[in-house]
């Protein structure tokens, strides 16, 4: 994402900034410095006048994340996830009514409407050998987004923001209508009734009467 962002908006007279909310293995200073080193390494590999990248590192409270999502200078969200599953931050962000750009793969496709969000295509590829471990087999696959589509999507949201903003409002309505607490309660209840028709119930324990001798 950082590389694509630099290449897409370098040497432009008007440049957006990228707020990178991430961490590596923990929230330590060493982890933060390692990420900053990687950002600078990517920056040094690009030529020209490059846009700014701001790193937000560490744990945030729900209130802080909500404030970030709804900040007036935050115009859109971009996620090039390789396949994290449900992806709660993406669903949360849709309620801001702002544009969202994400890869067209994994659990977030359950709630992102392709008509209202910018989805980036790509292919499934084997995980990098250095990533493989007993929990993540080398035969496992992750989603690799198409780099041409990344650039095209970033430019489209930046240059046609009003259009994407309207789509963001429609996605917000779609999310709120189909995935609020009450809707999920009804959906889950229906699934349980269909697949587990008879729930275990508590029964009264009845013991036999005993003829005890009289003392």
Image (tube, rainbow, N blue to C red):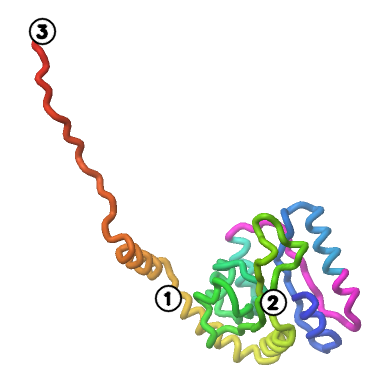
Give the CA separation, mark 2 to mark 1. Answer: 29 Å
Q: Which of 132 and 102 is in front in this view?
A: 132
Q: What element carries label 1?
A: helix
Disc 1 target residue? 178
Q: Give the range drawn in magenta.
A: 41-62
Q: Is residue 158 visible?
A: no
Disc 3 target residue? 215
Question: Which of the numbered marks, if any, corresponds to residue 144?
Answer: 2
Q: Which of marks 3 and 1 is nearer the N terminus?
A: 1
Q: Which of 102 and 201 is in front in this view?
A: 201
Q: What element carries label 3?
A: loop
Q: Earlier in the sequence, mark 2 or mark 1?
A: 2
The N terminus lies in which quarter of the figure? bottom right
10 Å neighbourhood of mark 1: few (<14), some, or many (≥20)? few
Image point (40%, 68%), residue name:
184
**In x, y percent, where is residue 215?**
10, 7
């Amino acid at each position: 994402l950082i590389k694509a962002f630099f290449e897409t908006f370098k040497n432009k007279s008007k440049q957006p900034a990228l707020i990178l909310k991430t961490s590596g293995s923990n929230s330590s200073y060493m982890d933060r410095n390692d990420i900053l080193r990687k950002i600078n390494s990517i920056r040094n590999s690009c030529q020209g006048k490059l846009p700014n990248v701001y790193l937000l590192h560490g744990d945030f409270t729900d209130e802080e994340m909500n404030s970030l999502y709804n900040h007036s200078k935050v115009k859109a969200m971009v996620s090039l996830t390789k396949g994290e599953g449900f992806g709660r931050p993406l669903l949360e962000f849709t309620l801001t009514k702002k544009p969202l750009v994400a890869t067209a793969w994994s659990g977030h496709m359950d709630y992102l409407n392709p008509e209202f969000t910018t989805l980036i295509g790509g292919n499934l590829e084997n995980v990098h050998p250095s990533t493989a471990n007993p929990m993540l087999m080398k035969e496992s696959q992750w989603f690799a987004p198409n780099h041409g589509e990344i650039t095209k999507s970033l430019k489209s949201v930046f240059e046609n923001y009003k259009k994407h903003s309207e789509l963001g409002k429609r996605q917000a309505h779609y999310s709120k209508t189909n995935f609020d607490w009450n809707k999920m309660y009804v959906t889950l209840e229906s699934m349980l009734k269909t697949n587990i028709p008879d729930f275990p119930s508590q029964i009264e324990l009845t013991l036999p009467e005993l003829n005890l001798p009289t003392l």
